[in-house]
Amino acid sequence: MARTQNIAQLQSQQIFDLLVIGGGATGCGVALDAASRGLKVALVEKNDFSEGTSSRSTKLVHGGVRYLEMAVKKLDRVQYNLVKDGLHERGLLLKNARHLSNRLSLVTPLYKWIDVPYVFAGLKFYDILSGKQNIGHSRLLSRKEALRRFPGLKADGLKAGVLYYDGQFHDARMALSLALTAEEQGAVISNHVAVIGLLKEDGQISGAELQDSLTGDSWPIKARGVINATGPFVDHIRMMDNPETPKILTASTGIHIILDKRFAPPDTGLMIPETEDGRVLFVLPWEDHAVVGTTDEPAEVSEHPLPLEAEIDYLLRHVTRYFNLKVEKSDIKAVWSGLRPLVSDPKATDTAKLARDHVIEDSEGGLLTIAGGKWTTYRKMALDTIDHALKVFHLNAPKPTCQTEQLPILGSADYDESGDKDLAKNYGFAPDIAAYLNRTYGDQAEKIAALSLEGYAARLVEHHPVIEAEVLYAARFELAERVIDVLARRTPLALLDTEASKQAAPRVLEIMAEELGWDQKRVNEETAWTEQRLNTAL
Ligand SMILES: Cc1cc2nc3c(=O)[nH]c(=O)nc-3n(C[C@H](O)[C@H](O)[C@H](O)COP(=O)(O)OP(=O)(O)OC[C@H]3O[C@@H](n4cnc5c(N)ncnc54)[C@H](O)[C@@H]3O)c2cc1C
């Protein structure tokens, strides 16, 4: 439904069962869980869906190999359970969002013989833990095989490798698709709408004050329960409830750089098990490019965190160390930074504080906060949150138990992996465009193809499969309200190639202005905002 209609519903509905604040992985997942149980749900996002951390992840659907190592080394049952849950959720995400995700082979290069049995045993255990949701068996690779699988790898001193499997997905479109699936299930959703205050009756939260971030209009909304799913911003909302409340969030940034596809073969990633500061680093193929990440630096909470030069140097240093290809700053096509929302549970003991993955907190004023976790486990976090919400807000859901385990995400129900052949044949798309549209939109791809026939079949920019019809589709059906919503989230262009995005921006603006009826003032504002985002931080 168009955003204006959604806003009209947010303004006219007498009372919602739940108001969910925040349209990242957590909030979109929570809204879908609640709506699919038959609750009346409103979901509001201050910027665009997934404009926060959720579009800036490493894009892995994983149990967490590193957590498993900690679980085993420290005999830590909580970490162990987190990996087990993560692997279960990995299997469900790969099924329920088939078009947006895929299985990925990963090679771990080993340069010391002593590491070979240790890493191999660890990854075998990772397979075993995934149980019925196993997506492939890890195996040892000879030195030669490791180099064949990942030809860019430095051969000097390489002893062997281990091959294992995890999932990979398109995070920004996943969050959007969760929100649109929640809408199909009856939720009222809107991006560019912020919560600017909480309403209280007799000391208890009864709703919130909303503001349209694009027009500045504000209005109250009533809800039986309010859920704070604002990631790095959870303390801001908690303080609207109680200005004295102690903070629960510590933020750290993680950046990724994009290199061209020479750095990663199309079907295999590289997992470097231990960097100079004891972290895991990935070099992964994604959308015909190579993604390298990530870092971990303490940071202030901000909406568009700037990647630091030191972080970029760190990633380049590691690529140089592990690759036989020369890499320089000028090879970087794009860079983006995300904020990790690390939370501690104020009520937990010290060890549990560190070990807990996600925290659900309900305040005396009746604010339910969900934070932490990871993208892979968004569904489990949502399930736990709504189970909790039903109790604390005394809600009677028509379907009291979670419905999302078998629920296909928009685009995946009738997705045909070989649908690109028909798209190419019936609409005359080049093979790369047909393949990209098929995997990006799944069973909705024909709709974009049909729009392309109205004179929007051209590529937005050379060497990328993104076409003009996607802009029209995004503005008409996917709630894209800003040029950068299209460049950075409806399509992957800005995350992959900053220069290409700058070239594409004027045409995106032209199509959106016509479709959404923008006046010159709005066009000028959009031009300035798009330039700012592409020249500083997404
Ligand atoms: C560098 C990095 C790499 C990662 N890689 C992976 C990975 O490979 N796999 C994995 O599983 N996990 C990964 N994660 C973790 C995962 O990305 C996060 O756990 C997840 O995206 C957090 O989602 P969220 O919805 O809680 O937060 P966010 O995505 O930040 O969403 C919160 C939203 O709330 C909105 N908001 C804030 N205030 C308001 C308000 N007042 N009104 C309305 N809306 C508001 C914000 O605009 C924002 O969009 C990674 C994280 C980082 C930082």
Image: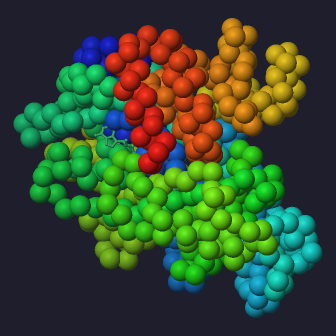
Q: Nearer the viewer, residue 385 or 468?
A: 468
Q: Nearer the viewer, residue 246 or 450?
A: 450
- Residue found at x 18% / y 50%: 239
Residue 385, percent across and down? 39, 46
Question: In the picture, residue 477 is in which quadrant?
Answer: top right
- Residue found at x 32% / y 25%: 214
Question: In the picture, residue 2 is in which quadrant?
Answer: top left
Residue 481, percent across and down? 44, 24
Using residue 331 as the reference point, say whether residue 384 is left or right of it.
left
Residue 457, percent across and down? 72, 18
- Does residue 336 appear in this view? yes
Q: Is residue 515 above or below residue 320?
A: above
Question: In the picture, residue 350 is in which quadrant?
Answer: bottom left
- Please, which residue is most extreme toward the top here? 454
Q: Is residue 273 above or below residue 536?
A: below
Q: Nearer the viewer, residue 411 or 402?
A: 411
- Residue found at x 55% / y 30%: 505
Q: Is residue 194 above or below residue 85?
A: above
Using residue 524 as the reference point, say whether residue 245 is left or right of it.
left
- Residue found at x 48% / y 65%: 309
Q: Is residue 106 above or below residue 453?
A: below
